[in-house]
Amino acid sequence: QSVLTQPPSVSAAPGQKVTISCSGSNSNTANNYVSWYQQFPGTAPKLLIFDDNKRPSGIPDRFSGSKSGTSATLGITGLQTGDEADYYCGTWDSSLSVWVFGGGTKLTVL
Amino acid sequence: QVLLVESGGGVVQPGRSLRLSCAASGFSFSSYGMHWVRQAPGKGLEWVAVMWSDGTFEYYVDSVTGRFTISRDDSKNTLYLQMHSLRAEDTAVYYCAKGNTGSHYGCIDSWGQGTLVTVSS
């Protein structure tokens, strides 16, 4: 059971928008920056969003991040088949003194 | 360009030890906190450990505390993970990862390609 809760899967059609939620608590998501990672099968994760809502250089603006209270959200617009991957949220947990990841969400672009 | 290359993985019997290495290049290694993150076959990401850039603090996930030790040699731009008393549940791909600050705060902004550790008799 992950400290951060994500839906196991989400799906949407090409060109549509999807959101992935990441629910935590006051000791993690509410008071520490949340980051999001994209992982294709057999490859290393890649940073998509950091500091709740910032995109590293090279990440398209189709990807966005937001946070309210104990929940963070990754948004992806203009879905492409190439976006099919696993997505993870992560942050520091100040009570447990560990980094925590969500369980991951598998995105299917129908 | 940040490059992280892990080595040292392999098949090891339960109860034995293994040391992973991560050779870093393309950035000022001594300025950043460094992490190990693992992923069991077919499972999600599990953070393992972090060491601050100045080595003053290190943190571990409970399941490896007392068995694993993270260390760094800034003169060699290399991160290590010494693993003792290995268990079947330690079987995973181990990723070396770079933080974007000198501590555990911020995010993990770069990842190596991973090295597979299989604990089996």
Image (cartoon, coloured by chain):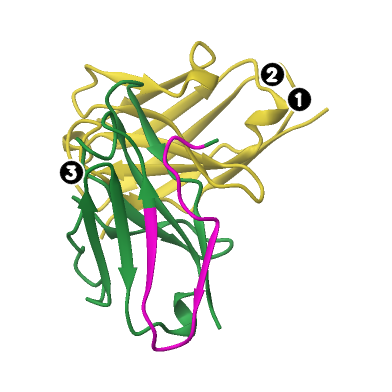
Chain colours: A green, B yellow
Q: Pick the residue in front: A103 or B47.
A: A103
Total count of labels: 3
Query: Which residue is identified by label 1?
Result: B13
Q: Quadrant of the N terminus of chain A?
A: top right
Residue A72 location (% of width, % of height) = 29, 52
Neighbour class for label 1 at 10 Å: few (<14), some, many (≥20)? Answer: some
With respect to residue B72, does B28 lie above or below? below
Can the viewer see residue B76 in this picture? no
Looking at the picture, do discs 1 and 3 lie on one chain?
A: yes
Query: Which residue is identified by label 3?
Result: B28
In the rendered view, does B10 fall on the left or right side of A71?
Answer: right
Part of the protein shown in magenta: A2-21
Label 1 secondary element: loop
Q: Magenta stretch containing residue A45, yes or no?
A: no
Q: Amino acid at mark 1?
A: Gln
Host chain of mark 1 = B
Whole-angstrom CA distance, mark 1 to mark 2, is 6 Å
Badge number at residue B16: 2
Can the viewer see residue B1 in this picture? yes
